[in-house]
Image (cartoon, helix red, strand yellow):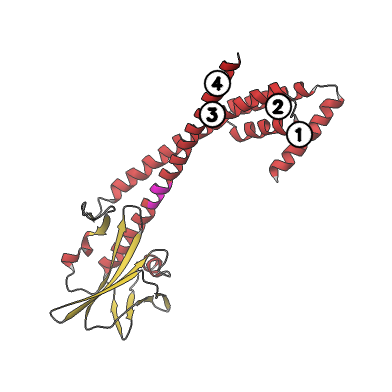
Amino acid sequence: MKRTIYILALCALSFVAVSCGESIEEQAARSLQMAQAAFEGGDFQGAKLQLDSIKILYPKAFEARREALKLMREVELAEQQRNVACLDSMLGAKRAELEEMLKSGFTFEKDEKYQEVGNFMAASQAPMKNLNNTYLRAQVDEHGVMTVTSIYKGRPIGHNKVKVSSGDSYAESANPISNYTSKHMGVTTERVDFRLGKDEGIIGFIVLNSDKKIKVELIGNSTHSYTMRGEDIKAIKSLYNLSFLLRSIEELEKQRGEAQRHIEFVNRNKQRGDSAVVENK
């Protein structure tokens, strides 16, 4: 809508200019000068609008259109270079934040032979420290994907639902991504995995209520209830924050890659354009 209004305004100015005797080439040259001024002032969007207007309003101003095409490449190149610099600055800050965060009690596990992606866990939730515990254990992979596993030890209950509550508020998920049951020396271990984003809010509930007592109910053929330990609530909250930070870094890296590819594309077009100019001389 804004672009349409802008082009209509240019059409009106063009009509005034023609009525005053200004030629099409002169009008196009004036738009080109305005685009150059906007570019030099760092207003890349304004420069691109002016350059677009030359193509739309002055289709027969061939020299101005050639110059506009060359300038458009320079504008796009400078714009993407600025984007890369901005993204590099943001990535530097995020990576420093990540380095500091990883000092606060996380462990990293990755079997190079069998795993392409490693996982971060809270040291307090390490399996060897919780061999006989029923609890919610969290982990975050290197891409920021967070999973919470409901681990139950005892007589079989066949649970596939987890409900977390505090007072009258609660969240409940019956959407596990996987479950596994094993038995050793008469004790059944049930593991049910829930992934952030598909967990129907149980992870977010724990994070939002991390300063309160949280009751956990494991629901299946029968129900087992317990109160979450403080260290487990803290672990899930810290891993949630780590997940968000890792996903932010990955998104910034993706944007930087796209900007860099755009720069390479513009440079290739510039080279082809320069070669064509040399061949035509």
Residue at horizontal 36 percent and vertical 71 percent from the top:
176
What residue is at 57 percent from the left and 29 percent from the top? Answer: 73
**Left or right: where 60 falls relative to 171:** right
Instruction: Give amino acid for label 4.
Output: Asp
Q: Residue furthest bottom?
A: 222
Q: Which residue is mark 2?
A: 31
Q: Is residue 210 above or below residue 262?
A: below
Judge from the rendering whether residue 66 lies leftward or rightward of residue 233; answer left or right: right
- Discs 2/3, front: 3
- Where residue 111 appears, as percent x and y from the top left, is 21, 54
Q: Which residue is mark 4?
A: 274
Disc 4 or 1, which lies upstream in sequence? 1
Q: Which residue is mark 1?
A: 10
- Residue at point 28%, 62% (across, down): 235
Which secondary structure lies at badge 1? helix
Q: Measure how far apart labels 2 and 3 are at the Cα level.
A: 23 Å
- Foreground tag (1 vs 3): 3
Res 38 visible: yes
Q: Amino acid at mark 1?
A: Leu
Q: CA distance from mark 2 to mark 4?
A: 23 Å
The residues bearing labels 1 and 3 have C-alpha atoms spaced at a distance of: 29 Å
Secondary element at tag 3 = helix
Q: Which mark is residue 269?
A: 3
Residue closer to the observer: 271 or 125: 271
Give, as a single range, the part of the protein colored magenta.
Answer: 247-251
Residue 191 shows in this picture: no
Q: Earlier along the polypeptide chain: callout 3 or callout 4?
A: 3
Real-space Cα separation, disc 3 to disc 4, in angstroms: 9 Å
